[in-house]
Image: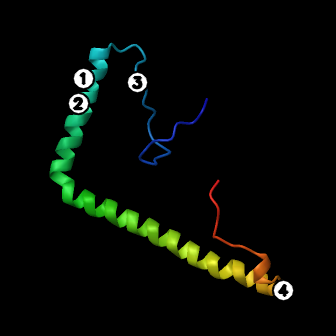
Amino acid sequence: MKKWHQPSGLSRGLPFKVDANWTPEQAMAVWELLDDLRDRVGTHYGLALQKLMRDQRVTHLLRLTLCQEILSGFIPSLFRVFAIPSSEVAWDGPQMK
């Protein structure tokens, strides 16, 4: 069985299964309940949640920037160590696949 990755990032906890035989009306009722819950939590904790999400994004972006700075200094230094002329190498940073 394929492991399901939760949006929260949690990998442990109680298993939660959704009945595969709900009617569309039952599914809509659950959807509306969750929407109302999200609205209530957002109303009460909105500013704190916004700050937390912003802080998490900034921390993530700082890590990415730091990694890019380290790599941009590290890779060219390898070329110098192995005496590879920089004219023979084009380095545009790490490539995403």
Instruction: Determine contact: label 3, label 1, CB under 8 Å.
Output: no
Judge left or right: residue 90 versus residue 55.
right
Real-space Cα separation, disc 4 to disc 2, in angstroms: 65 Å
- Please tell me whether mark 4 sits on a helix, a strand or a loop: loop
Q: Which residue is mark 3?
A: 18
Mark identifier at residue 83: 4
Judge left or right: residue 72 versus residue 60.
right
| Residue type indicated by callout 3 | Val
Q: Residue at x 51, y 41 (%)?
A: 5
| Residue type indicated by callout 2 | Leu
Residue 35 location (% of width, % of height):
24, 35
Real-space Cα separation, disc 1 to disc 4, in angstroms: 67 Å
Judge left or right: residue 50 versus residue 59.
left
| Closer mark to the observer between disc 3 and disc 4 | 4
To which quarter of the image does residue 76 belong?
A: bottom right
- Please tell me whether mark 3 sits on a helix, a strand or a loop: loop
| Closer mark to the observer between disc 4 and disc 2 | 4
Mark identifier at residue 33: 2
To which quarter of the image does residue 68 belong?
A: bottom right
